[in-house]
Image (cartoon, rainbow, N blue to C red):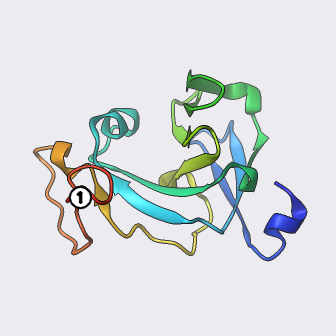
Amino acid sequence: MTGSENSNARILVGECYCRAVRYEVADAFSYAMNCHCSNCRRTTGAAFKPFAGIEQSKFRIVGGENQRTIYGDDTTHDAHCARCGSLLYSRVRDGKWVHVAMGTLVDAPSIRPNAHIFVGSKAPWHEITDNLPRYRGHIGNA
């Protein structure tokens, strides 16, 4: 993270279940959503993955970098803790953005998910009970 980019943003801490991997991220997320796609369900073991998106430059690993298992390539990938398996984040959009798995944040972010995406492939046993907008695929695909 560069100091000038994040000088006004509060810094949040995140970590995996076993605390082997820790990260810091600016509380300057651009968007947050609940993703119901089958990949997010499988990587989290949950009905959906709440995530928050931020530019790569506002995120950094501060402990346990060598304790990560990367699924994908250097540009785009999912990063899990090699010890406990927690999904920590995904690098997306040509590696320029990070989707932080919100459940790994120790500190509460100021942003909240504002939509459900990929509800066309949501778990059939899960019922969405809030009033957030729902999109069959990405936002814009109602």
Is there any visible trace of residue 95 in the rendered image?
yes
Q: Name which residue lies at 59% across and 65% down.
A: 29
Is there any visible trace of residue 82 in the rendered image?
no
Residue 106 percent coordinates (x, y): 61, 59
Compared across the picture, whether 78 is left or right of 140 comes to right
Q: Which residue is mark 1?
A: 135
Compared across the picture, whether 118 is left or right of 123 comes to right
Quadrant containing the N terminus is bottom right
Q: Name which residue lies at 69% across and 49% down.
A: 56
Is label 1 in a helix, a strand or a loop?
loop
Numbered-mark total: 1
Q: Residue 141's quadrant in the figure?
A: bottom left
Residue 42 percent coordinates (x, y): 33, 33
Query: In the image as oriented, which residue stretches furthest toward the left?
Result: 124
Give 62 or 74, whichever is nearer the viewer.
Answer: 74
Compared with 68, 87 (above or below) is: below
Compared across the picture, whether 87 is left or right of 114 comes to right
Residue 104 percent coordinates (x, y): 55, 51
Compared with 3, 100 (above or below) is: above
Q: Residue 30's quadrant in the figure?
A: bottom right
Quadrant containing the C terminus is bottom left
Residue 84 percent coordinates (x, y): 54, 30
Q: Name which residue lies at 59% across and 42% down.
A: 16
Q: Residue 44's quadrant in the figure?
A: top left
Give amino acid for label 1: Tyr
Q: Name which residue lies at 32% across and 58% down.
A: 139
**Other residues around mark 1 within 10 Å, as few (<14) / some (14–19) / many (≥20):** some
Query: In the image as oriented, which residue stretches furthest toward the front?
Result: 140
Compared across the picture, whether 126 is left or right of 55 comes to left
